[in-house]
Image (cartoon, grey):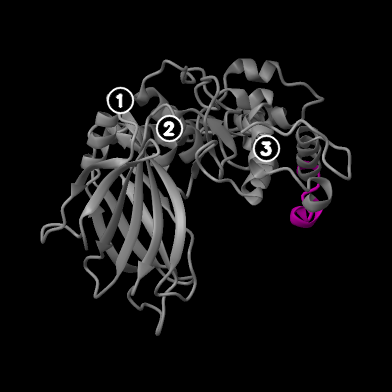
Amino acid sequence: MAVRQGNSEGNGVSGSTGACLFDLFCSETPSLNSQSQRSQWLPHVTPQERLDNLMRQAGNRFCADCGSSDPKWASSSLGVFICIQCSGIHRSLGVHISKVLSLKLDDWTDEQVDELVKLGGNTVINKRYEACVPSNIKKPKPHSSIEERADYIRRKYELLQFLDTEKNLQCSFPPSPQRYLTCSPSNAASCGFQMDKRHFEKQTTKARIGTALRHSWGRKESEHKISKKSTSLAGMVQFVGLIKVNVVKGTNLAVRDVVTSDPYVMLSLGHQSVKTRVIKNNLNPVWNESLMLSIPEHVPPLKVVVYDKDTFSTDDFMGEAEIDIQPLVTAAKAYEKSSINESMQLGKWVASGENTLVKDGIITLEEGKVKQEIQLRLQKVERGVLDIELECLPLTQ
């Protein structure tokens, strides 16, 4: 989407410049009521235009994790702009760590863009999450393997091994001697490592040995955990495409809170997971919420689980189902190799007693998009039906 170049009516500020000024104002004024102020500053600037401005900032033009140019994805929860390969690994971390959105395919809200502005973008985030990278661990490059990316990204965001000690989170690896030499009096924060060294030197020999052993055990345990997780992901994060899942609505869902429920839907594909928002007090919720997942080379079923959100206890189970997305992927691959332009039916997933379909899931080609509408009967629960729309997208998006 092109950024508005003309002047906005009434204030003489261009859409692009106005968005930059407003986002700068937001980042320096945390207490700002952004919704009310936005109407005064930027009456005509859309969230996508603001997002385009953020994408053009120097640090955001390259993937925060591997340096690939022109990243097309972002983690709205972490505040980083990332490439397609790294985005799949972020999804495997789980939405509680990283919520991945497409910069072009997803519909961003002003609140989501506000959060990106507040977090600061790639440069600010990397200064925090990569403050203490040991010399024996190399940051991935654009051509790095999936295993190398997965190992680094999990250390960086899940295990938090590279954080600085000034945030009261201990670095899992001792810094190199050069770091002490470059510490200046004007930079008190970076001198934390030098203070740690002096404290270590003052300890008795017995205490030093104990500290060293504890650090060694901690490093080995972390390395064992990351190695085990990386191994379990091997072959599961080589992507062949993207699947856009629109969770439309639920019908006659099960009661879990006396007379009603607060349902949300969790989607899982391989090691990736995403979830919808919670809808309060509704057994017939309408989400109309689109979520994106990367399709692994060996296509697993798409798992769908509905939960009832509880504040003071574990969320209650409200049913599950599985979707075989292989027919949709096969149809999308066939379409990419063809010269078909008109709308037509490409195939279908036939409802039977062996699956959870209420009716046949028809695969269609509409305006160059390969889609499938599915109605699922929830399993292992007394009742409930879920309506879902799928769209298979090429990896280039």
Residue 49 badge: 3
Please state which of the two labelled residues, at mark 3 or mark 1, is closer to the viewer.
1
Residue 157 badge: none
User: Within 10 angstroms of label 2, few (less than 14), some, or many (20 or more) residues?
Assistant: some
- Residue type at numbered disc 1: Ser
- Residue type at numbered disc 3: Glu
- Whole-angstrom CA distance, mark 3 to mark 2, is 44 Å
Q: Is residue 298 left or right of residue 74?
A: left
Q: Residue furthest front?
A: 342
Q: Quadrant of the N terminus?
A: top right
Q: Residue at x 58, y 27 (%)?
A: 132
- Whole-angstrom CA distance, mark 3 to mark 1, is 34 Å
Residue of label 1: 339
Could you tell which of marks 3 and 1 lies nearer the N-terminus? Answer: 3
Q: Which residues are magenta?
A: 27-37
Could you tell which of marks 2 and 1 lies nearer the N-terminus? Answer: 2
Q: Residue at x 58, y 46 (%)?
A: 108
Q: Residue at x 83, y 46 (%)?
A: 41
Q: Nearer the viewer, residue 61 or 213?
A: 61
Q: Is residue 269 left or right of residue 350?
A: right
Q: Position of residue 113 (x, y in %)?
A: 65, 44
Q: Position of residue 152 (x, y in %)?
A: 44, 28
Residues marked 3 and 1 touching at CB (< 8 Å)? no
Residue of label 2: 219
Q: Position of residue 337 (x, y in %)?
A: 27, 24
Q: Secondary structure at mark 1?
A: loop
- Whole-angstrom CA distance, mark 2 to mark 1, is 55 Å
Q: Quadrant of the C terminus?
A: top left
Camera sees residue 98:
no
Q: Residue furthest bottom?
A: 258
